Amino acid sequence: MNQFRLTRRQRRELQQTLAHCHDTRLYARLLALRQIDEGCSVGRVARVLGVSRQSIYNWLRACRETGRVDALKERPRPGRPSLWGERLGGRLEQLLHQSPQAHGYFAGDWTVPLLAEHLRHLWGQEPSSHTLRRQLHTLGYTWKRSRYALEPDPQQEKKTADSA
């Protein structure tokens, strides 16, 4: 690959983006561009950043093709399709309106692990606790630690009468 050079406009854009960048991956890519523009070898920059030389070449190509430094920004990745849909979300909400005791559990309230176990029995797949919490948040539920309610002290009257 022939020598890579940034234009003045690209250097200015690169400096502005570096100054306000909060994404570590983008920051590393921008640093790589700047280092190569200053004459460092691709191999050296790759070693310093802990990436492959091919990654550096890909970044250079993206910048060269678009003429913009923001071509190095992360693009959305689709990932694995979610198992949750409106149907499953609706069934989860129905489940939350029922007591765990109605389903044979010795518990007064649903917990995330208990919900996960019950969903595994219903659907054959156990969602992760992170996924389940995210779905509960989507449905508007918040988590709060239960507080123990102690019985009133039967000796309270005697204790306060003795101190008076």
Image (cartoon, helix red, strand yellow):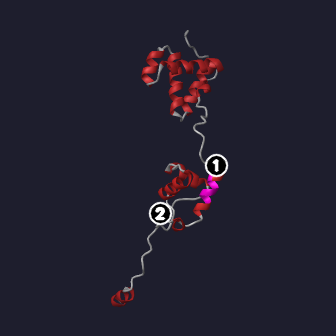
Residue 66 in percent (x, y) is at: 65, 21
Which secondary structure type mostly characterizes the magenta part of the structure?
helix
Of pointers 1 and 2, the one earlier in the residue sequence: 1
Q: Quadrant of residue 149?
A: bottom left
- Above or below 49: residue 150: below
User: Label 1 crowding class (10 Å Cα cut-off): few <14, some 14-19, many 20+?
Assistant: few
Residue annotated with mark 2: 145
Q: Nearer the viewer, residue 8 or 39?
A: 39
The residue type indicated by label 1 comes to: Gly
Point 64% across, 56% down: residue = 90
Residue at the top extreme of this rendering: 2
Residue 43 in percent (x, y) is at: 45, 16
For label 1, the SS is loop
Q: Which residues are magenta?
A: 88-93
- Above or below 57: residue 112: below
Quarter occupied by the N terminus: top right
Quarter occupied by the C terminus: bottom left
Q: Nearer the viewer, residue 122 or 52?
A: 122
Residue 124 in percent (x, y) is at: 53, 50
> Seen in the image, is 82 located left or right of residue 39?
right
As for residue 92 lying within the magenta part, the answer is: yes
Residue annotated with mark 1: 85
Q: Quadrant of residue 18?
A: top right
